[in-house]
Amino acid sequence: MKKKINIMLNIVIPTAVAYIVFFMLYYLYQKTFFEYRWLAIIPFVIVTAFIIKDNMREWRVIKQQG
């Protein structure tokens, strides 16, 4: 049970929050800079790379605890 709570608190919730913030910013970016909307790929890649790196670290910690 504790392992599932750790996964929820340390992986799922931060990932969801990061993507929600990204898509809110993307929507704003698209409305204001329609011609350059393809540049929004750059922050998407940065957010995705950060999430993957952070989740890998969390998985290692959870595996060591379990």
Image (spheres, rainbow, N blue to C red):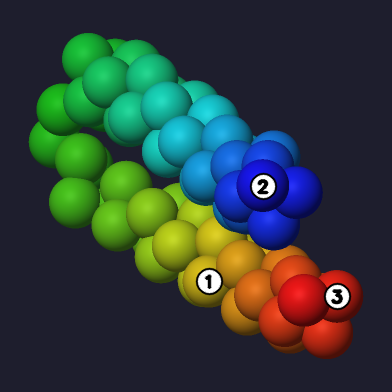
Foreground disc of the pair 3, 2: 2
Q: Residue furthest left?
A: 35
Residue 48 at x, y = what percent? 45, 62
| Inter-mark Cα distance, 1 to 2 | 24 Å
Amino acid, disc 2: Met
Give the mark nearest the N terminus, 3 or 1: 1
Left or right: 25, with 14 as reference point: left
Residue drawn at 56 percent across, 61 percent down:
51
The alpha-carbon separation of the residues under discs 3 and 2 comes to: 13 Å
Closer to the chain start, of discs 1 and 2, is: 2
Callout 1 environment at 10 Å: few (<14), some (14 to 19), or many (20+)?
A: some
Identified by mark 1, the residue type is: Ile
Residue designated by label 3: 65
* Residue underneath mark 1: 52
User: What residue does disc 2 label?
Assistant: 1
Kind of residue at disc 3: Gln
Query: Could you tell me which secondary element the residue under label 1 belongs to?
Result: helix
Q: Residue 23 at x, y = what percent? A: 34, 30
Q: Count the marks.
A: 3
Which of 41 and 64 lies nearest the eye of the viewer?
64
Seen as rendered, the residue at the extreme front is 1
Relative height, residue 32 to residue 26 (above, below) = above
How much space separates mark 3 and mark 1, taking CA atoms?
Answer: 20 Å
Residue 44 appears in the rendering = yes
